[in-house]
Amino acid sequence: MEENNILPLMTAAETRISGMDYRSIASTPTEEEKSLKMVAEGAMIPETRVSAQENLVKLHKRGRMLVASYEAIRFQKLDLFAVTLRQIGAYIQKMHLQDAVDVLVNGDGSTGSAPAKLTTAATTLAYSDLLTLWSKFTAYQMNTLLVNAKTAAAILGLSAFSDPTTGLHFQNTGKLGTPLGAEMILCDAVADGTIIALDRRYALEMVVGDAVTVDADRLIDCQLERAAVSSTAGFSMIFPD
């Protein structure tokens, strides 16, 4: 799972719990509360309130059962089973990523957690669209862009990002460019024509119930070895504005 894990590049905090229920905390200051005004001598200092969210964080359990016959275990190399387990870990991590994208797009269900959305009627991406998106981050930094491969190609194809220096960097290292200073991350869970922009320092909290659980048993009557691999996690918005 760690080999394919890009969640640290888009989450601000990771919370590990020992149960199935978790209620996150959040602070939703108004524009008036965001401006820290001068405090007169002896006057009360303005407050920023942090409270528990009204909804529980939804944790999703993802897993797969690995089943092998006695003959497969006896006559095959254990390295082949390690490859299969790595593939299962990659699939589990991909589903956790899909859950994170769903929360970023639709919110976590609590009041005011659905992020702002910008739409355009144009059928092709323009540099001005990225500038409009960037200009919305007045109180934060647009340091992360989540896109699928098709949208990433459209961004890299813009004349503003196809200069020789950017192209040489991509050709030599395979690393994507950083449009307007934001790290661009490829994610198949993002729909075509959609760009998710966020400040990863403040946007998302990952709640982990069980990082990895492995249970194994043996069925004597049909000579099968079974191993169940699962992971439980959920996501919550911190500052959706």
Image (cartoon, rainbow, N blue to C red):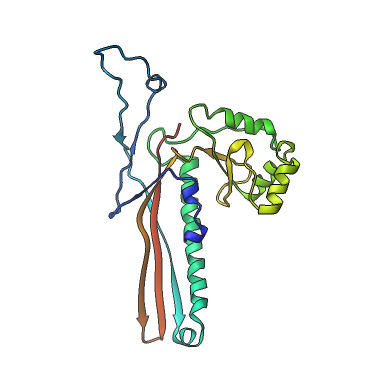
Q: In which quadrant of the rendered view does residue 142 lie?
A: top right
In the visual, does 97 lie left or right of 171?
left
Q: In which quadrant of the rendered view does residue 229 lie?
A: bottom left
Residue 236 in the image: state x and y as whole percent: 40, 43
Residue 21 in the image: state x and y as whole percent: 29, 50
Work out which quarter of the rendered image holds the C terminus and state it: top left
In the rendered view, tell whether residue 35 sits above or below residue 208: above
* Residue farthest along the left direction in this orientation: 42
Q: Residue at x 45, y 39 (%)?
A: 201
Residue 112 in the image: state x and y as whole percent: 41, 32
How many marks on residues?
0
In the rendered view, tell whether residue 157 sits above or below residue 231: above
Residue 43 in the image: state x and y as whole percent: 26, 14
Q: Residue at x 29, y 34 (%)?
A: 51
Q: Residue at x 70, y 39 (%)?
A: 161
In the rendered view, tell whether residue 64 sits above or below residue 12: below
Is residue 11 visible in the rendered image? The answer is: yes
* Residue farthest along the top direction in this orientation: 40
In the visual, does 64 lie left or right of 16?
right
Is residue 157 visible in the rendered image? The answer is: no
In the visual, does 48 lie left or right of 103?
left
